[in-house]
Amino acid sequence: MRSSLRGLSINSLFETTSYLEFRSSYSDESARIDQVAEPVFDVSQHGGIVIHGRSDATLNPGGVRIGTAEIYSQVEQLHEVAESLCIGQDWDDDIRVILFVLLRDGFDLTEELQAKIKAKIRTGASPRHVPTKIVQVSDIPRTKSGKIVELAVRDVDHGRPVVNKEALANPEALDQFVAMVELSV
């Protein structure tokens, strides 16, 4: 038996002076509970906890929850792939997985390499993890602290404005996703 929890509330952490000053700026009693950026974890019937990652990095194609890290851990074992980023794209009343790959110098995304990537994901994760589309990109957008920004790419893909663009180290990397023909078919 597994239960899946989304969201984590903490009501007794961060008792530093600066944090207490920050918290005192809230007048609402409910603001005393701190919301942490929705980690996703499962609790087994024996009380064990498996942390899969954050829910903003969770895909849900066909109702199956997939952590993006599960895909990255397979793809980035391949010598040809320097880095990758995947999103869930709204498509035909469902979600389809789109994988963007930044390849090492000297490699192109051929049909053979796409087949190799899909086979690696299928055998290392599951057939449900295999992306519908794989697209080569010239750069992966990231924050100033080096984290890839899946949500910003997803927002661009869905025609939504990207919030907090000033937090990106390379906001120009988002430009390649704006009119990407591969995403419209």
Image (spheres, rainbow, N blue to C red):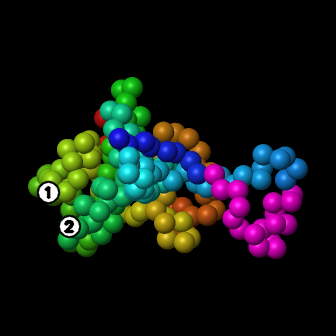
Outermost residue to the front: 46
Q: Provide the secondary structure element on which disc 2 rests.
A: loop
Q: Quadrant of residue 60?
A: top left
Outermost residue to the top: 93
Quadrant where the C terminus lies?
top left
Apparent side of residue 9 relative to residue 122 in the rendered image (left or right): right
Is residue 151 a member of the stretch shown in magenta?
A: no
Residue 150 seen anywhere in this rendered image of the structure:
no
Numbered range of the magenta stretch: 9-25
The amino acid sitting under disc 1 is Lys
Apparent side of residue 59 relative to residue 132 in the rendered image (left or right): right
The residue shown at (47%, 50%) is 40
Q: Which residue is mark 2?
A: 78
> Where 184 falls versus 34 (above or below)?
above
Q: Position of residue 71 (x, y in %)?
A: 30, 55
Of the numbered discs in the image, which one, if any, rests on residue 21?
none
Q: Which residue is mark 1?
A: 116
Q: Residues within 10 Å of mark 2 (few under 14, many from 20)?
A: some
Q: Position of residue 127 (x, y in %)?
A: 20, 44
Q: Provide the secondary structure element on which disc 1 rests.
A: helix
The residue shown at (39%, 26%) is 93
Front-most of 37 and 49? 49
> Where 140 falls versus 66 (above or below)?
below
Front-most of 23 and 149? 23
How many numbered circles are shown?
Answer: 2
The amino acid sitting under disc 2 is Leu
Front-most of 175 and 121? 121
Quadrant where the N terminus lies?
top left
Q: Position of residue 21 (x, y in %)?
A: 85, 66
Is residue 22 a member of the stretch shown in magenta?
A: yes
The residue shown at (44%, 43%) is 4
Mark pair 1, 2: CA separation:
9 Å
